[in-house]
Image: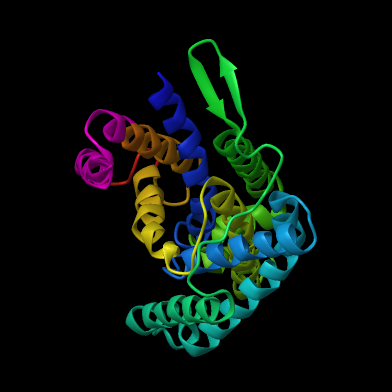
């Protein structure tokens, strides 16, 4: 029962780091494999805010989100001018994000070194005990932050004109223009939003475990797998997929050992896609 509960909480963390990919890859069809690098930037922003200014890592990430939003808009503008406008975003666009991934990693190594960094907060290390069940706050707090973020983004995308425009931009750009919306501007805003969520994902990551500049590589395959498994463009499907992978990994690690976790979780991905190619809630 504790393994299942930890898996549910771990799934919340996976959802937090996958939100940005669900927007950029699922809605904009932009394969931003550098997204884990932006998550790491969020981790180090939380680390600086926590160690230098003494503020909570989640609060530090929220303060940094506007800067990440502007950074995302800038990255998309470069991507659009250099690749998308020329209809050359397949291989060269992928190389662009590969370059961003390694440049970010090298820059972090030069500034912070290769040592692991961690943050301090009053809830880290504590746990909530409910009979035989234990809820570690280092997993519970990220889970709650993740669910609030997912629900907030879902409401924004479904209830506002801008949110509906973001959902429509990958479906029918001509119809979007007829609604007096500029698809490029909408994409720029949406990509900025996807990078802004990376700051929050980075804070969640550094709360759960110490980070170093190359740790983002571990999550490249996992975040894209979660988005594909849940169904491209579906936030609800992404959460279900994240929780499913979290539970499968913790149960596998508990029963058979941690080394089996990645193989079993990606095996679940392959089986699910073989039965339902569009993902759990894909259309």
Instruction: Give the side of residue 208 with respect to residue 69, left or right.
Output: left
Residue positioned 48% across, 58% down in the render = 21
Residue 215 located within the stretch drawn in magenta: no
> Which x, y percent locates residue 257?
25, 37
Q: Which residues are magenta?
A: 251-276
**Quarter-wise, where is residue 25 in the image?**
bottom left
Q: Quick one: quadrant of the C terminus?
A: top left
Please say whether residue 256 is one of the residues in the magenta stretch. yes
Depth check: give the residue in front, 49 or 167. Answer: 49
Across and down, in percent, residue 229 comes to 34, 45
Instruction: From this view, report whether residue 142 is shown above or below residue 38.
Output: above
Q: Is residue 152 left or right of residue 173?
A: right
Among the 4 quarters of the image, the one containing residue 88:
bottom left
**Residue in view at x 22 percent, y 42 percent:** 260
Residue sitting nearer the eye, 143 or 83: 143
Who's the residue at 54% across and 62% down the image?
Answer: 39
């Amino acid at each position: 029962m504790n393994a299942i509960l930890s898996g549910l909480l771990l799934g919340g963390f996976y959802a937090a780091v996958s939100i940005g990919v669900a927007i950029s890859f699922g809605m904009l069809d932009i394969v931003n494999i550098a997204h884990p690098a932006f998550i790491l930037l969020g981790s180090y922003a939380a680390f600086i805010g926590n160690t230098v200014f003494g503020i909570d890592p989640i609060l530090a990430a929220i303060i940094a989100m506007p800067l990440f939003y502007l950074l995302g808009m800038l990255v998309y503008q470069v991507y659009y001018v250099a690749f998308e406008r020329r209809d050359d975003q397949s291989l060269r666009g992928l190389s662009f994000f590969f370059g961003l991934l390694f440049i970010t990693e090298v820059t972090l190594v030069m500034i912070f070194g290769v040592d692991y960094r961690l943050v301090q907060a009053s809830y880290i290390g504590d746990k909530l005990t409910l009979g035989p069940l234990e809820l570690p706050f280092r997993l519970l707090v990220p889970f709650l932050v993740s669910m609030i973020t997912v629900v907030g983004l879902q409401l924004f995308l479904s209830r506002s004109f801008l949110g509906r425009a973001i959902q429509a931009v990958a479906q029918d750009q001509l119809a979007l223009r007829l609604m007096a919306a500029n698809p490029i501007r909408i994409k720029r805003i949406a990509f900025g939003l996807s990078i802004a969520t990376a700051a929050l994902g980075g804070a969640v990551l550094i709360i759960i475990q110490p980070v170093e500049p190359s740790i983002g590589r571990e999550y490249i395959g996992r975040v894209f797998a979660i988005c594909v498994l849940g169904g491209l463009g579906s936030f609800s499907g992404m959460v279900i997929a994240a929780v499913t992978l979290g539970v499968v990994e913790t149960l596998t690690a508990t029963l058979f050992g941690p080394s089996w976790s990645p193989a079993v979780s990606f095996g679940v991905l392959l089986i699910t896609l073989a039965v339902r190619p569009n993902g759990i809630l894909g259309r």
